[in-house]
């Protein structure tokens, strides 16, 4: 497994913790949502940092109380057609003002990275065979876009109406 | 017409680059067919029975003569010399080679065209009233908001992997020529009591195996806030639409399961949160897009136009064509011509390279270089001077597209069916050809009056059979093609779903069954002006069942 962002591999200190494993002292751990709900007090005191892994059907209202203390949220895409992840990202950022790292994991392909980035994601956890260069190329292909999303950079509409040329 | 600025051109160019790379990665084996499928579908590329089919978008059905000429060139260069206009106002080519697609897309981009989002589980090409801008009854030209939606929905980062496909239609007139209530979202441009323009939004209509006439979800969304409202509609669907069963994944199922009231409440809650957060376009951008659709420079022409009146008096064939194929224009002295792509015995919606070029010439010479595609698979010359109608008609006769049958029994919608489509259970085109031949007599067609026959080769209902006054559904019965009949469907402002009449008919018997249905209607109508659908709504299915199946 490797962790990448739009520019390629990045350092990663987060460890996925199995539900039956205990965190080592000072470890930054990613736990399941069920475990976070049950053990948040002990987890937050034992670990340096705590993150959670969720899927598209996560009830964001249930996650909300933990958001200020979470260092990372990993959203799993069970298959590349499951587009709930894009709404999950936007809502976490725009509705719940989540400020920590947002990472995608699962069955996405390089061409979807651009959309994930626009929906508030920062990083991607990928298998060793994942074509990182294709992701970088896919992200770099488009220089402009029409609609507002989580990334607040200038849209085409902004550029048109501000007379920027 | 809308003209691309440098940003639109950049997007179009970058899209060609992206898809070119995707094809390369597929051919190199980096992308599996499973991974490539959603990507090629989002570019309108289907693997059909014999070859790839490419669907090119014609946004809201508006086309320039120059663009049509390019479509003709593409038919000649990359296909077998013809194209097929569809019920979604697009054009399809049926014999495309994958490795030529990047080059083809680059050619399309030179005339500001693309194949973006013409398939796949994303927001599809927005369709609109084919008489946009020329119909006298419209509140506002629907192409303005259609173009706004086109841009907003292009490569939308959140809504490109929806549970299922998503179709918009817009009408600017009380007379619904865009079948808006059969769409995932139908938009009806309205004026409120204060005289302000806004949008009535219908959500959750559709055809397929579960036909639904969309309920009204919001009677008046203010003009300046449509996109944020649509974003709320789509977000609720993207999060909660079913993804476990492809047959239950359309938004119509979500709206039905939640109930329109609860769906509306969830949309409203989300909309209140996102209103005013920069999703909606500012008024100056709306004005910029509007400026492309301002009326062209029409001449001042006094009616009646004597040469036009005389030509009708002298020539009955011409007069009859005017009666069915020329729609009133809001400007005196003009008419909007519907070119019938339904010659007797022909394939509905097909046009050859030569025919497309001839029509492009007509548009340049007589219609201010503009054309429309209708959801009934015909073409429109929207701006023809009445004095020129006779010349247009003569030229259309030369190319075989002057059939005076618009809205009549031989103006049939048919999906590609088993001749092309890998989903189909039965052929559609040959049935439509045989019906057309059976009712070839124009006197008879005009005697029967307005009647829409729509044929689908499978339950996916691409031929809109649910909305046909007479709908024909092809089914597979023990390896044989059978055809079920539905009656009473309508796709206009009185939208209704056709009801199944009884057991299906074999391919040999189906045309005779249609004839019996029509004879029954002719026998029971109260007067010649009572149309088929009016008569059906008055008497119901029983007399038709009796004539088809006997009195049991």
Image (cartoon, coloured by chain):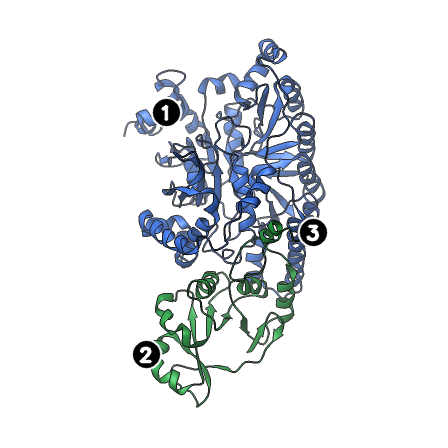
Tag 1 subunit: B
Q: CA distance from mark 2 to mark 1?
A: 65 Å
- Residue drawn where x is 38% and y is 66% of the image: A60
Q: Is residue B202 visible?
A: yes
Q: For residue A51, what is the image quadrant?
A: bottom left
For the colour green, the matching chain is: A
Tag 3 subunit: B
- Could you say which is closer to the camera, residue A79 or residue B157? B157
Q: Is residue B370 above or below residue B457?
A: above
Horizontal side of residue B88 vs B191, given as left or right: right
* Disc 2 packing (10 Å; few <14; some 14–19; many ≥20): few
Mark 2 on the same chain as mark 1: no
Q: Which mark is residue A38?
A: 2
- Could you say which is closer to the camera, residue A123 or residue B244? A123
Q: Is residue A39 above or below residue B463?
A: below
Horizontal side of residue B446 vs B114, given as left or right: left
Q: CA distance from mark 3 to mark 1?
A: 50 Å
Q: Which residue is mark 3?
A: B100
Q: Picture coordinates of residue B380 (x, y %)?
A: 58, 30
- Residue drawn where x is 55% and y is 46% of the image: B150
Tag 2 secondary structure: helix
Q: Is residue B508 visible?
A: no
For the C terminus of chain B, which image quadrant? top left
Tag 2 subunit: A
Q: Colour of chain B?
A: blue
Tag 3 secondary structure: helix
Tag 1 secondary structure: helix
- Residue drawn where x is 65% and y is 41% of the image: B3
Q: Picture coordinates of residue A22 (x, y %)?
A: 40, 87
Q: Which residue is mark 1?
A: B534
Residue at the far bottom: name it. A25
Q: Is residue B408 above or below residue B42?
A: above
């Amino acid at each position: 497994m490797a962790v990448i962002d739009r520019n390629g591999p990045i350092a990663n200190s987060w460890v996925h913790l199995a539900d039956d494993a205990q965190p080592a002292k000072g470890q930054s751990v990613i736990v399941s949502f069920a475990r976070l709900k049950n053990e948040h007090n002990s987890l937050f005191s034992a670990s340096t940092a705590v993150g959670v892994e969720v899927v598209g059907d996560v009830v964001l209202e249930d996650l909300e109380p933990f958001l200020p203390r979470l260092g990372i949220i990993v959203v799993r895409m069970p298959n590349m057609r499951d587009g709930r992840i894009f709404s999950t990202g936007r809502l976490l950022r725009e509705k719940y003002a989540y400020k920590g790292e947002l990472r995608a994991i699962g069955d996405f392909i390089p061409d979807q990275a651009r959309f994930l980035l626009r929906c508030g994601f920062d990083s991607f956890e990928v298998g060793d065979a994942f074509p990182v260069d294709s992701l970088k190329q896919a992200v770099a292909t488009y220089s402009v876009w029409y609609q507002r999303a989580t990334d607040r950079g200038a849209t085409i509409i902004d550029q048109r109406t501000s007379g920027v040329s | 017409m809308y003209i691309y600025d440098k940003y639109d051109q950049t997007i179009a160019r970058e899209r060609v680059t992206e898809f070119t790379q995707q094809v390369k990665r597929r051919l190199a084996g980096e992308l599996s067919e499973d991974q490539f499928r959603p990507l090629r579908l989002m570019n309108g590329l289907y693997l059909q029975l014999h070859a790839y089919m490419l669907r090119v978008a014609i946004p809201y059905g508006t086309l320039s003569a120059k663009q049509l000429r390019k479509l003709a060139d593409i038919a000649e260069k990359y296909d077998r010399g013809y194209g097929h206009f569809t019920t979604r106002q697009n054009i399809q080519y049926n014999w495309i080679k994958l490795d030529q697609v990047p080059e083809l897309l680059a050619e399309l981009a030179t005339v500001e065209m693309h194949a973006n989002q013409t398939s796949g589980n994303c927001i599809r090409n927005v369709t609109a009233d084919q008489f946009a801008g020329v119909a006298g009854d419209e509140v506002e030209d629907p192409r303005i908001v259609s173009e706004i939606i086109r841009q907003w929905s292009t490569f939308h980062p959140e809504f490109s992997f929806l549970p299922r496909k998503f179709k918009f239609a817009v009408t600017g007139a009380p007379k619904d020529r865009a079948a808006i209530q059969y769409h995932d979202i139908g938009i009806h441009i309205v004026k409120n009591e204060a005289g302000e323009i806004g949008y009535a939004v219908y959500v959750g209509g559709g055809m397929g195996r579960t036909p639904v006439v969309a309920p009204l979800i919001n009677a008046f969304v203010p003009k300046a806030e449509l996109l944020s409202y649509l974003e709320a509609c789509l977000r609720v669907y993207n999060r909660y639409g079913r993804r476990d069963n492809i047959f239950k994944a359309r938004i119509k199922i979500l709206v039905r399961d939640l109930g329109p009231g609860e769906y509306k409440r969830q949309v409203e809650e989300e909309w209140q949160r996102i209103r005013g957060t920069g999703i909606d376009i500012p008024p100056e951008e709306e004005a910029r897009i509007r400026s492309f659709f301002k009326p062209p420079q029409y001449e001042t022409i006094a009616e009646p136009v004597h040469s036009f009146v005389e030509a009708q008096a002298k020539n009955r064939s011409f007069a009859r064509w005017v009666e069915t194929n020329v729609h009133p224009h809001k400007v005196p002295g003009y008419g909007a011509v519907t070119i019938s792509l339904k010659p007797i015995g022909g394939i509905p919606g097909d046009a050859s390279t030569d025919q497309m070029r001839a029509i492009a010439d007509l548009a340049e010479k007589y219609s201010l270089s503009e054309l429309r595609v209708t959801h009934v698979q015909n073409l429109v010359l929207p701006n023809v001077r009445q004095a020129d109608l006779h010349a247009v008609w003569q030229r259309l006769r030369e190319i075989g597209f002057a059939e005076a049958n618009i809205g009549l029994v031989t103006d049939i919608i048919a999906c590609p069916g088993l001749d092309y489509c890998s989903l189909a259970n039965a052929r559609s085109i040959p049935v439509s050809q045989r019906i057309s031949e059976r009712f070839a007599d124009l006197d008879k067609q005009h005697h029967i009056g307005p009647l829409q026959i729509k044929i689908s080769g499978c339950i996916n209902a691409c031929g809109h059979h649910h909305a046909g006054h007479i709908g024909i559904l092809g089914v597979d019965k023990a390896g044989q093609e059978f055809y079920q009949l539905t009656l009473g469907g309508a796709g206009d402002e009185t939208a209704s779903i056709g009801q199944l009449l009884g057991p299906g008919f074999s391919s040999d018997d189906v045309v005779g069954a249609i004839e019996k249905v029509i004879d029954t209607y002719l026998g029971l109508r109260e007067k010649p002006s009572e149309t088929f659908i009016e008569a059906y709504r008055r008497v119901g299915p029983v007399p038709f069942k009796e004539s088809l199946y006997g009195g049991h």
